[in-house]
Image (cartoon, rainbow, N blue to C red):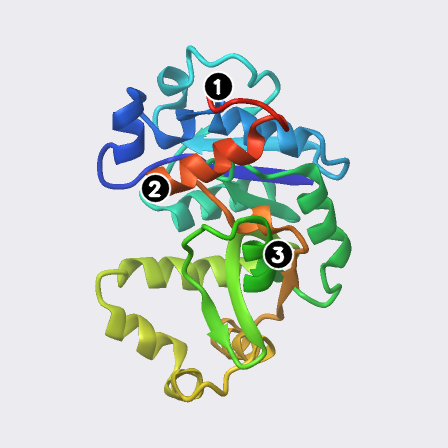
Amino acid sequence: MTALVLAGQRGGTDPLAAARGVSHKALLPVAGVPMLLRVVAALRAAPAIGRIVVSIERPETTLAALDGLSGVILRPAEASPARSVAAVLEEFGTPLLVTTADHALLSAAMVTHLLNAAPPEAAALAALARRETVLLEFPETQRSWLRLRDGAFSGCNLFLLARPEAARVVGFWREMEQHRKRPLTMAWMLGLLPLLRYALGMMTLQGVARALERRCAVRLGFVELPFGAAAVDVDKPSDLVLVEAALRPVGGSPG
């Protein structure tokens, strides 16, 4: 199976990267190790992953000084994450696991759980973690929650494109990206009835999947991960503090 790590960045230098003196957030040292290398190491440790692709701007120069990427396939990032996924999907096909370079706490166990729990009928699926699971491990984390009738969930930046039909989902994602600065347009693309159900507190996780299925004309699924760390990426300084604390050896000092 191929795994893709999205390591590109949109709209100039990331503030966290600039503060640490690196060109890309993917190169940000987390507990002394660039985030990208942590993600690659987790994927290498997952038995099902046989090929790793990293998508980043100007890979030959951006990653020239980074050791630890032997055997990793480098591809230039496209204009958006969805376009980068589409390009790699076209080149390597399915199944394709997709994650991000800022997923510094990614583990082989998370990847294996997702693959083992994947509904066989789903052409594409996303990993989620329940709010209770995340807060049990990281009570101080501040995340955006998808609040549904059957619980509150956080995305985990971990996706599986299991079958060729998943290209339709990537196509829909590309459409959404084109309207990312027009939230009303994006809302209408999802459909009025699902939005009303969500606003009224009636939407369930299965209902979200069915609404997206109708829009993409492909079977979709979600896998709930039992790892709170799966939902914690490094987006802001407070995330970096939490992640470095989680990676610190028990009894170790902050510095």
Q: Is residue 231 above or below residue 6?
A: below
Q: Residue at x 54, y 56 (%)?
A: 135
Badge 1 marks a residue whose secondary structure is loop
Report x, y in % for residue 180: 27, 60
Residue located at (56% from left, 27% from top):
248
Cα–Cα gap, marks 3 and 1: 39 Å
Q: Earlier in the sequence, mark 3 or mark 1?
A: 1
Task: Provide the residue designation for mark 3.
Answer: 164
The disc, 3 or 2, on the residue closer to the chain's N-terminal end is 3
At x 37%, y 35%, the residue is: 8
Quick check: marks 2 and 1 in contact, CB under 8 Å?
no
Q: Residue at x 40, y 26 (%)?
A: 28
Look at the image and tell me in which quarter the N terminus lies: top right
Per the model, the C-alpha gap separating discs 3 and 2 is 35 Å
Q: Amino acid at mark 3?
A: Pro
Residue 17: % across, % down: 31, 28
Callout 2 environment at 10 Å: few (<14), some (14 to 19), or many (20+)?
few
Q: Is residue 9 left or right of residue 146?
A: left
Mark 2 and mark 1: Cα distance apart in space: 17 Å
Q: Quadrant of residue 39?
A: top right
User: Pointer 1: what residue?
Assistant: 32
Check the image and report above or below for 136 versus 213.
Answer: above
Residue 226, horizontal then vertical, whole percent: 68, 55
